[in-house]
Amino acid sequence: MKTVLDLIELIYASVAGASRWQTFLDAFVLAVGGRTGALALHDANRDGGGVVCWSGWPDDEVRLYLDRYAAIDPWNINSGRWPEGLVGTDLDLCPREEIEPSAAFQEFYGPRDYFHGMGGTILVTGTGRSLITATRGAGAGPFGEPEQPILRALMPHLRQAAIL
């Protein structure tokens, strides 16, 4: 498992070469005991530019999620309201009573056992939001201690990398 210092080193190596972000994200997901993850770093100088990578998500699932569920996903919608620097879990985004009846959960997350999530808002600019997420199955249990402190320690470095 990568230590926080190893992950920070990967962040700054990724600034030098955008192709390295995938290595960082894969290492982050592993470090927090996740099964999948996503990283979006929006370029503050260009609308729609930046880095987007997925860890553990098959390409067809990424397309399906973006095409059919992203716009109606309560987790996705509520994460858009999170302030910069905030780290939290799926339950911080919305209670089970809100997410479980949703089409996003019933048709996408639930059947794939993407049950627990954790993430953070890295940077908010006039052109977009930068964020990082990790998910795992019901059997792995919710994210909490020690996973959230790992992400909290990375957030200032991810913010600096997004600015750079």
Image (cartoon, rainbow, N blue to C red):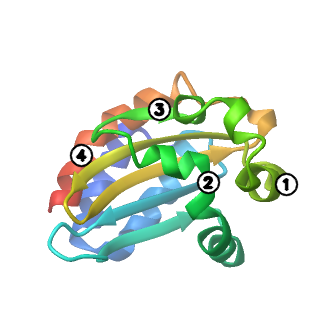
**Residue that label 3 marks:** 88
Verify CB contact (< 8 Å) between mark 3 and mark 2: no
Mark found first going from the N terminus, 3 or 2: 2
Q: In which quarter of the image is the C terminus?
A: bottom left
Q: In what element is the residue under mark 4?
A: helix
| Amino acid at dot 3 | Gly
Which corner quadrant of the image does residue 63 belong to?
bottom right
Going 74% across and 34% down the picture, which residue do you hit? 140
Q: What is the number of the mark on residue 73?
A: 2
Mark found first going from the N terminus, 4 or 1: 1
Q: What is the number of the mark on residue 111?
A: 1
Mark found first going from the N terminus, 4 or 2: 2
- Nearer to the camera, 128 or 142: 128
Counting other residues with Cα less than 10 Å from the Cα at mark 4, is it few (<14), some (14-19), or many (20 or more)? some
Q: What is the number of the mark on residue 157?
A: 4
Verify CB contact (< 8 Å) between mark 1 and mark 3: no
Q: In what element is the residue under mark 2?
A: loop
